[in-house]
Image (spheres, rainbow, N blue to C red):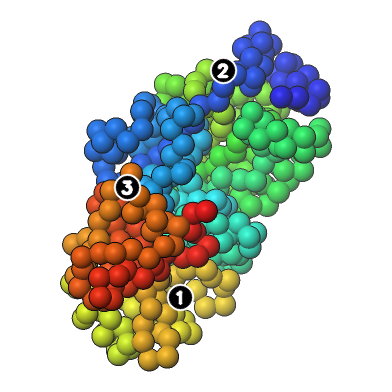
Amino acid sequence: MSLPTAFCARMQALLGEEYPDFLESLTGVRSLGLRVNPLRIPPADFAARAVFPLKPVPWCAEGFYYPASARPGKHALYEAGVYYIQEPSAMSVGAIADAKLGEWVLDLCAAPGGKTTHLAGRMQGEGILIANEIHPARAKILAQSVERAGIRNAAVTNETPARLAARFPEAFDCVVVDAPCSGEGMFRKDEDAAGEWDEASPAMCAARQDEILDEAVKMVRPGGRVVYSTCTFAPEENEGTLTRLLTRHPDFSVAAVEGYPWFSAGRQDWWQDAPPSVAHAFRLWPHKLAGEGHFCALLVRVGAGERVQPAPAKPLAKLPPEFADFARDTLRALPDADILRAGDRLWAAPQEMPALDGLRVLRTGLELGMLKKGRFEPAHAFALALTAQDVRRVVDLPSDSDEIMRYLKGETLTVNCENGWTLVCTDGFALGWGKTVGGTLKNHYPKGLRWK
């Protein structure tokens, strides 16, 4: 790997005698991680199944290292949302945010979905989670991550921070800003990131981070928290960004967080006029732990106060008969949620889900399906949020079987099952829909997700 000369020079100046170890770490074998989805299975139970050789990530209860030989991204359990593949040091953000049951949480720069799915697992379906991504293509990837994880209480938006701030003043208990950055912690993982870096990158990114944070802080209630993070080493984007934020917004402070002895302190000495509290931030160094590197800080707004409650979305007063017929035939109970309608699509959302009219929205809660020519066709997302106990017809296939491979490729299966919509599971975890007719399961796994 070829590192930019200017990057090496500045890191040598910053790190001094630590620099050789740092440089060596960037040329070594990188650590690979996955994070178990507790909406599916307790992490310890997944580890006990020994699907892959796993070692715990010490700072994340849901996180594990896996060997390069494991290939967890090419496994049926990945498609079932049982785990999410995530760089280990990036797991620090969700751990420090530590979203609680019933909270309102905003993930402001959320794609591709690692932080969002981590937050959702901690929330256990209680509260409201808004996952936002400003770039349309990346917002679609984010929505797919939310769908795969079986998250019921999240909306996915494709908005600017400013438009969200105007809509949701002081509405959240926690806002996570995993900010766009110069990506110096990505160099070992992605050589293109090293090639795109230049000396102006940190300053340009820092200016954008300032703008994002100025909007983020407007959306936090008094006593609430902002988690700020980057995957870069540049002081301009880390201690510098915090210093500028605290100067502009003196009602925020960097909180000390206990219980993370693997992390290093923020470097007050690396930024002029940085307040002492900058040392409460965390730096994750690749030469000091098994990870690519990260920066993370917990900011708390002074005072105490309730959230400003936005107007809720308006549910349907009566279920469409097509959906009612489907539910009677396929489900053991209706979703415990409000049913919303957008065009021909139906969604299930918590009663508190805010109205999102006028915003660019990809998901409002859980997509149930679509009304089509007098019938209801269930969405793939709906399947992934169900369990075998929720439905009347189930086909459960071992994750290492030929049948599950055929299902993932979109092939028709022969099954011993009554006629009707059927939930296809693997090792007990929902994977998608099929429709059984006369012992034949017509495959409804989405064409865009099918294995080649």
Residue in the image at 48% along x and 46% along y = 114
In depth, the one of 135 and 94 nearer the eye is: 135
* Residue type at numbered disc 1: Ala
Give SS at disc 1: loop
Tell me if label 1 and label 3 are in contact, CB under 8 Å: no
Q: Secondary structure at mark 3?
A: loop
Image: 102 above or below 300: below
Residue 236 left/right relative to 255: right
Residue bearing mark 2? 287
Question: Label 2 neighbourhood size at 10 Å, few (<14), some (14-19), many (20+)?
Answer: some
Q: Which residue is mark 1?
A: 355
Q: Residue 223: x percent and y percent?
A: 42, 49
- Spatial CA distance of label 1 from label 3 is 44 Å
- Up-down relation of residue 278 to residue 209 (above or below): above
Q: Looking at the image, is 197 positioned above or below residue 414?
A: above
Q: Which residue is mark 3?
A: 401
Q: Position of residue 138 (x, y in %)?
A: 60, 56
Q: Which residue is drawn at the image coordinates 45% and 21% (left, top)?
A: 262
